[in-house]
Amino acid sequence: MGLQRNVSLSTGLRYKGHSPFWAYILHRIGGAGMALFITIHIFSTFADQQGWKIGGLVNNLYTSVPFQIFILFCVLFHAINGLRITILDFFPQKLMPYYRQIIYVQLALFVLVFGFAAVSVVATALGRM
Amino acid sequence: MEVTFKIFRYNPEKDERGNYVTYKIDAHPNDRVLDVLEHIKGKEDGSLSFRRSCAHGICGSDAMRINGRNMLACKTLIRDVGDHITVEPLLGLKVAKDLIVDMEPFFENYRKMLPYLINDSPLPEDGKERLQSPEQRARFDETTKCILCAACTTACPSFWANDEYYGPAALMTAHRFIFDSRDEGAEARLEILSETNGAVRCHTAYNCTEACPRGIHITQAIGELKLAMVTGNID
Ligand code: FES
């Protein structure tokens, strides 16, 4: 009957959800980013062991400052957001009515921790130059 | 004021795919989106198809995406959505024609929740009502407000990804009976909710809560169900 049910990624992303929806999307980006990092890390170690040149190149990629900051973002956002979800899951009646406010607390915490971590990475990189 | 209405159109007898048609309408800021749709159907293009019945936010027929968000057309004022309004069918259900979607998968999930009172115990001595206190009634009051409009289920990213997921509206129905002190089917329903496509597919994106035209705290109710599944406690 009629048009097929088909919610493409872009249609889904265009839905006008609020802050928890964006946290949901970033949580998945964070998870995918970590999976990507672990995959290329395993690959580069393997390639190094085999004496393949590409191992060093991949190594350079993920030790670069932008990639480190990206991974920091992935890990910290995923962890802090996951913590919020878990805490709320334990107290649905007490905490979930305040889910909007709690998102702001989470964001403030994230900006603080991520900002500190990112600045440390950049300062270390500059110190090495 | 002049309002530009961009409406998703799809005629299964003619069109391969859907397209958008724009109408410029003279409307009052206090008109509802439904009023303008009625105007277009009555005066501009009689082939425009959409569902409506009560026109007062009770029957749940006219949920649709208005400016990218699920709402009831009969409860949405023009002044609240601006003068450029895009109207599209709900996401995640097949489009039958224009703004009408096939609701059958949605109701199929609803039926899976055993949406009726289960109580095989003998009636009270006087043979009349099974009484409950105001507190017991208040425990599930929130989820009795559901009008099955599907705004929540079709706003849920887990449902977009997998329509086997029972969806928030079906879970609301389960909540409504599980926490009813007169009902004895909680165990059976919690069993159903524990299936792969049950409550665990809720990833707390809160799109359902934001979309609900009755203001039900849906994600919270699902959270209560998850907790009941784990602890077995339905107080
Ligand atoms: S027409 Fe009944 S809810 Fe809108």
Image (spheres, rainbow, N blue to C red):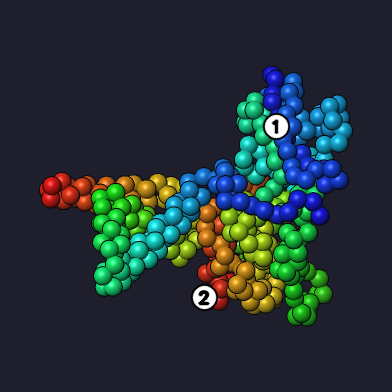
Q: Amino acid at mark 1?
A: Lys
Q: Amino acid at mark 2?
A: Thr
- In the rendered image of this protein, does residue A78 appear above or below residue B183? above
Residue B180, image quadrant: bottom right
- In the rendered image of this protein, does residue A50 appear above or below residue B11? below
Local SS, label 2:
helix
For disc 2, the marked residue is B231
Quarter of the image where the N terminus of chain A is located: bottom right
Q: Nearer the viewer, residue B32 or A41?
A: A41
Residue B111 seen in the figure: yes
For disc 1, the marked residue is B6
> In which chain is the residue bearing label 2?
B
> In which chain is the residue bearing label 1?
B
Residue occupying image coordinates x 71% and y 68%:
B113
Q: Is residue A116 left or right of residue B35?
A: left
**Label 1 vs label 2: CA separation?**
49 Å
Residue occupying image coordinates x 62% and y 69%:
B197
Local SS, label 1:
strand
